[in-house]
Image: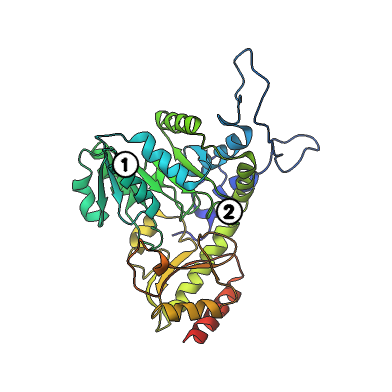
Amino acid sequence: MCPIDEHSPAPQGGLTAGSIGVRSVMPPREAAGPLVAPLSLATAHHQDLDDVAPTRYGRWGHDSAAALEEVLGTLDGGTAVVFNSGMSAVSTVLMSLLGAGDALVVGADAYYETRQIADQLAARGVDVRPLTDVARQLPEAVTGARLVVLESPTNPLMRIHDLRECARLSHAAGALLAVDNSMSSPLGQRPLDLGADLVITSDAKVVGGHNDIILGHVTARGPELVERLRSWRHLHGTIPSAFDCWLTRRSVGSLEIRLARQTANAAALTEVLHRRPEVLDLRWPGWRLDPDHAVASRQMLRGGGLLSFRLPGRDHLHRFLKASSLVVPATSYGGLQTMANDIATWPHLAVPPGLVRISCGCEPTRDLVDDVVRALDAAA
């Protein structure tokens, strides 16, 4: 698994993904022109009497959305469509592709709100087939299915699914495969290159990276799928604002740098946590001892900044979090600050008390490691 982006595929024109991200914040070069693309807030435009203008009305599309879609599509390896939240992206995929009588196969370890939408579809006549063991159950469950939806790595338990094999099985049965890639981002994993038909990303997380954006996107290669997504967004009014698109495009410029530091911090913390007797069930896909490392190393470009482990009970976990100066108890992940989530507070997950998901931030690695060690010592 490559720790730095220079070794990952060059999506366009020989440039690595990191270089594409940095350059994406710039407008076309002009003499004495700005280095940062300007923000356009226009929602109304002069009526095009000759019917040739690409932009007509802000809900249908706007320049800031188009610019963000261009870079996200390039990084994912397809054509991107942006939405006003990650869940809007998820619901568009599910609602636009499925109707009464269709079959949906969904990982039971996918994001819980994705599964809630699946439950709503079941009430409307969709045959929903949840998988508790994807590798074992998918070959049979996919028969006659229209769509398979998986998340890998999974949130918050950090499980990995073999996406190439899942794509092979899905396509052999005539089904589409959609992969939630929010935990990795396009610089951590490219599901379209692994055979997926659609990749879904909550850009509020790793891509946005500053805890100040709610936005999502779906990327596909087939023009029919892209048009279906855009038509649904047009009709249901789920396009993000120009300002949120501009902020996200800004964030893509630093994505490679942020993800590199977050991955390095996760690697260092994993090695320290592995040696602590009170730490159990340690999971990080970039770790050589992780149960899913073999699969992760074949399909992920980076291990990413998220890991999970268990301490001996919630009281112990809370003492650790209160003793830390750098680990912030908070919902969400992928931001500049290291954040931790007490998973037992999530009512939809039956997990042992003391299980925690840590999203490593961009603090200097030594600072973060020293802080975590001090907090663990204090909690013990």
Specify the quadrant of the image occupied by residue 142: top left
Nearest to the eye among marks 1 and 2: give it. Answer: 1
Distance from disc 1 to disc 2, alpha carbons, whole Å, reads 35 Å
Percent x, y of residue 309: 41, 72
Label 1 crowd (10 A; few <14 / some 14-19 / many >=20): many
Give the mark, 1 or 2, whose residue is nearer the N terminus: 1
Percent x, y of residue 373: 52, 81
Q: Identify which amino acid the numbered label 1 is placed on.
A: Leu
Q: Is residue 3 above or below residue 289?
A: above
Is 12 displayed left or right of 308 in the figure?
right
Q: Is residue 357 visible?
A: yes
Percent x, y of residue 229: 44, 33
| Residue extending furthest toward the right | 32
Q: Residue at x 47, y 37 (%)?
A: 78
Percent x, y of residue 266: 49, 68
Q: Which mark is residue 121?
A: 1
Residue matched to label 2: 255
Is 227 displayed left or right of 57 in the figure?
left
Numbered disc 1: secondary structure: helix
Specify the quadrant of the image occupied by residue 294: bottom left
Is 135 displayed left or right of 297 in the figure?
left
Q: Residue at x 39, y 51 (%)?
A: 113
| Residue extending furthest toward the top | 50
